[in-house]
């Protein structure tokens, strides 16, 4: 599969991540880059909230996530990450998932994740799920030997296989295991993500056109700003939640999520979604 890695400004991307030194197609590099990407580039849907399209071509992704130091949601994040891995020399395949996250019914395939080969093993990589997502790659496991249970910092993740063959990524919360999404190993092509992205960014049933969603995963806390409510959840099960006023919105986006909105975009975001908050 062509991820157009040759078009990527790899030096600018690595600088965005704060990565120094050689980048080689081995697991150590994969782990370091995955963790650095999650730390540096937040999850956000602000382009949709500003009434703009969400292009997935690599030049647009580089401009937004690298040059303008913005974030993005799963397709933007994982397509950029796939291009970087492709440029470095990794073998990368795209997969699709059905998000669970407390859903009462089975949802459509609308999430993107990656299958990456490194050091003779297959790794489940996903830099685009938001606050509850993986910090590092997790072993994908072989058929019949899928179950994984790993700690990443103080957070715990697992993969289980259900009777229908679907693999389920889950994370441990205060009340026990919480299913994030289910997926299969069916390969997805770039055009599949274009279709998924059209639904996610335009369909009335999509949760990403209703209100701003900004998230960031970190070893010490999971930060989310949904609408005007900021939540900081910690591995011990404690959390803080408060409202965010329009006057402090720009500061919160910058301080908590590293998102740099210019004055015009900030004013338009407030006018469209926060004016009555």
Image: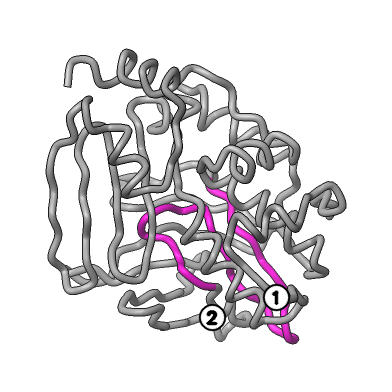
Question: In the rendered view, does 277 fall on the left or right side of 28?
Answer: left
Comparing labels 2 and 1, the label whose residue is closer to the camera: 1
What residue is disc 2 on? 146
In reply to whether residue 124 is colored magenta, the answer given is yes
Q: Is residue 169 above or below residue 66?
A: below
Q: Is residue 143 above or below residue 108?
A: below
Q: Which quadrant of the figure contains the C terminus?
A: top left
- Of labels 2 and 1, earlier in sequence is 1
Q: Residues within 10 Å of mark 1 (few under 14, many from 20)?
A: few
In reply to whether residue 47 is colored magenta, the answer given is no
Read off the magenta span. 111-136
The residue tagged with tag 2: helix, strand or loop?
Answer: loop
Q: Nearer the viewer, residue 165 or 50?
A: 50
Q: Nearer the viewer, residue 177 or 26?
A: 26
Question: In the rendered view, does 268 fall on the left or right side of 85?
Answer: left
Residue drawn 79% across the image and 50% down it: 8
Q: Residues within 10 Å of mark 2 (few under 14, many from 20)?
A: some
Disc 2 and disc 1 in contact, CB within 8 angstroms = no
Please give the label number shown on residue 21.
1
Q: Which quadrant of the figure contains the N terminus?
A: bottom right
Residue drawn 75% across the image and 54% down it: 83
Question: In the rendered view, does 107 fall on the left or right side of 137?
Answer: left
Residue drawn 39% across the image and 74% down it: 157
Q: Residue 106: where, in percent of width, then height?
A: 41, 46
Q: Nearer the viewer, residue 143 or 218?
A: 218
Q: Residue 117: where, in percent of width, then height?
A: 73, 75
């Amino acid at each position: 599969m062509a991820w157009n890695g040759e078009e990527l400004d790899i030096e600018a991307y690595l600088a965005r991540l704060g990565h120094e030194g050689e980048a080689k197609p081995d697991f150590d590099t994969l782990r370091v880059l995955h963790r650095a990407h999650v730390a540096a580039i937040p999850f956000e849907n602000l382009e949709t909230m500003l009434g703009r399209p969400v292009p997935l071509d690599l030049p647009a992704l580089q401009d937004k996530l690298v040059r303008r130091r913005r974030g993005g949601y799963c397709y933007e994040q994982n397509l950029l990450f796939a291009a970087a891995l492709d440029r470095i020399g990794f073998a990368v395949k795209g997969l699709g998932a059905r998000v669970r996250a407390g859903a009462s019914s089975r949802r459509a395939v609308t999430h993107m994740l990656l299958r990456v080969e490194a050091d003779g093993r297959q790794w489940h990589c996903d830099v685009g799920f938001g606050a509850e997502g993986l910090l590092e790659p997790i072993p994908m496991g072989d058929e019949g030997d899928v179950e994984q249970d790993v700690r990443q910092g103080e957070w715990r993740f697992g993969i289980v296989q259900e009777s229908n063959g679907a693999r389920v990524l889950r994370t441990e919360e205060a009340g026990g295991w919480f299913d994030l999404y289910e997926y299969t190993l069916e390969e997805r092509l770039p055009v599949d993500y274009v279709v998924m992205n059209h639904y996610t960014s335009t369909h009335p049933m999509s949760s990403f056109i209703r209100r701003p969603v900004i998230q960031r995963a970190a070893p010490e806390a999971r930060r989310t700003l949904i609408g005007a409510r900021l939540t900081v959840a910690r591995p011990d099960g404690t959390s803080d939640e408060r409202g965010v006023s329009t006057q402090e919105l720009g500061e919160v986006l910058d301080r908590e999520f590293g998102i740099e909105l210019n004055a015009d975009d900030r004013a338009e975001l407030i006018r469209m979604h926060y004016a009555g908050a």
